Image (cartoon, rainbow, N blue to C red):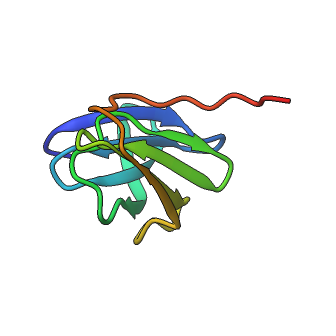
Amino acid sequence: IAHPGGIQFDGKRIAIEDLWSLIVYRLRLSGNSAIIVSSTPLNDARYVEQYWIRGKTLIGPDLYGNVYFWKYPDGGAPVSSIQGFTEPYGSTVSVGR
């Protein structure tokens, strides 16, 4: 992981993003070591600084005004997106009624 970005616990594993490659790695911790068990490529985005995982969805804004939604942990092409923001930085999800 050349340039670590966002870190989150996904309910089973630690997920950490490499900002340069736009890949979120799932890690298994063992003592003082971490082993990569899978990876989630964030295709089509350009510099996602911080992401949010909610169940089987990874949500990530990029610094070019887009918010992408990927299947998690599969990744690949986004399943949907929202455009038109001014430099979104981070993301969080809350349940509204």
* Residue 1: percent from left, percent from top: 20, 46
Q: In the rendered view of the protein, which quadrant contains the C terminus?
A: top right
- Which x, y percent locates residue 47? 22, 45
Q: Residue at x 40, y 71 (%)?
A: 76
* In-front residue for pair 94/25: 94
Residue 96: image quadrant is: top right
Residue 36, quarter of the rendered image: bottom left
Tag count in the figure? 0
> Which quadrant of the figure has residue 48?
top left
Q: Is residue 21 left or right of residue 10?
A: left
Q: Tell which of 82 and 2 is nearer to you.
A: 82
Query: Which residue reaches farthest bottom?
Result: 77
> In the depicted view, which residue is nearer to us: 82 or 17?
82
> Vertically, is 91 above or below 24?
above
Give the left or right position of residue 51, taking residue 3 as reference.
right
The x and y percentages for residue 95 are: 76, 31
Which residue reaches farthest front? 84
Image coords of residue 75 (percent x, y): 45, 65
